[in-house]
Image (tube, rainbow, N blue to C red):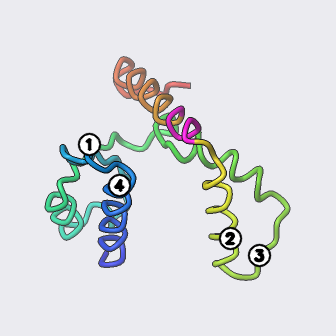
Amino acid sequence: MEYYSSLLVQLKDILKEKHRGKFTKGVFFLDDIAPAHWALATQKKLAYMDFHCLDHPPYSPDLALLDYHLFPGLKKQLKGCHFLFDVEVIAAAETWLDGQPSEFFLNGLRKLEQRAKKFIELYGEYVE
């Protein structure tokens, strides 16, 4: 959990750097429900850094951003590749992610918003 907390600090620093002068109201943060992400120490760190955690709905493949937006393209890119070391996989994934235009990520967030609204309208029933 200490490692995760250090990643959150790095994230805040990156956000401040990229959004100078616009980083005044905190960050809305949607995370998955992994134990390290919801541990008390992590929650305290998020609150201290002014990250506002959004309630996460019960697992739904409709709302798992990585499952429907990021992973298909990444899987396609890495298909058939063989890696000997974890650092090679990480580098390949980072290269692919860095190569995506900002609109790619914005579109993913818009899709998440649309799916979340539909999820709410259907009272948590399966969307697609």
The 10 Å Cα crowd at callout 4, few under 14, some 14 to 19, many 20 or more, is some
Q: Amino acid at mark 2?
A: Val
Tell me the distance, in whole angstroms, between the alpha carbons under discs 1 and 2. Answer: 31 Å
The 10 Å Cα crowd at callout 3, few under 14, some 14 to 19, many 20 or more, is few
The 10 Å Cα crowd at callout 2, few under 14, some 14 to 19, many 20 or more, is some
Q: Which residues are magenta?
A: 102-107
Q: Which of marks 3 and 1 precedes in the sequence?
A: 1
Q: Amino acid at mark 4?
A: Leu
Along the line of sight, the residue nearer the viewer: 4 or 60: 4
Q: Amino acid at mark 1?
A: Asp
| Mark linked to residue 15 | 4
Q: Amino acid at mark 3?
A: Phe
The residue most toward the front is 21
Residue shown at 34%/40% (left/top)? 57
Which residue is disc 2 drawn over?
Answer: 89
Q: Check the picture and name the quadrant holding the N terminus.
A: bottom left
Q: Is residue 112 above or below residue 15?
A: above
| Mark linked to residue 83 | 3
Foreground disc of the pair 1, 2: 2
Secondary structure, magenta segment, majority class: helix
Residue shown at 15%/57% (left/top)? 47
Q: How many marks?
A: 4
Which residue is disc 1 drawn over?
Answer: 55
Q: Which of marks 2 and 3 precedes in the sequence?
A: 3
Q: Position of residue 104 (x, y in %)?
A: 59, 38
Q: Do residues under tags 3 and 2 come within 8 Å of each other at their CB atoms?
A: yes
Tell me the distance, in whole angstroms, between the alpha carbons under discs 4 and 1. Answer: 22 Å
Q: Which of marks 2 and 1 precedes in the sequence?
A: 1
Tell me the distance, in whole angstroms, between the alpha carbons under discs 4 and 2. Answer: 25 Å
Secondary structure at badge 4 equals helix
Q: Do residues under tags 4 and 2 come within 8 Å of each other at their CB atoms?
A: no
Q: Do residues under tags 1 and 2 come within 8 Å of each other at their CB atoms?
A: no
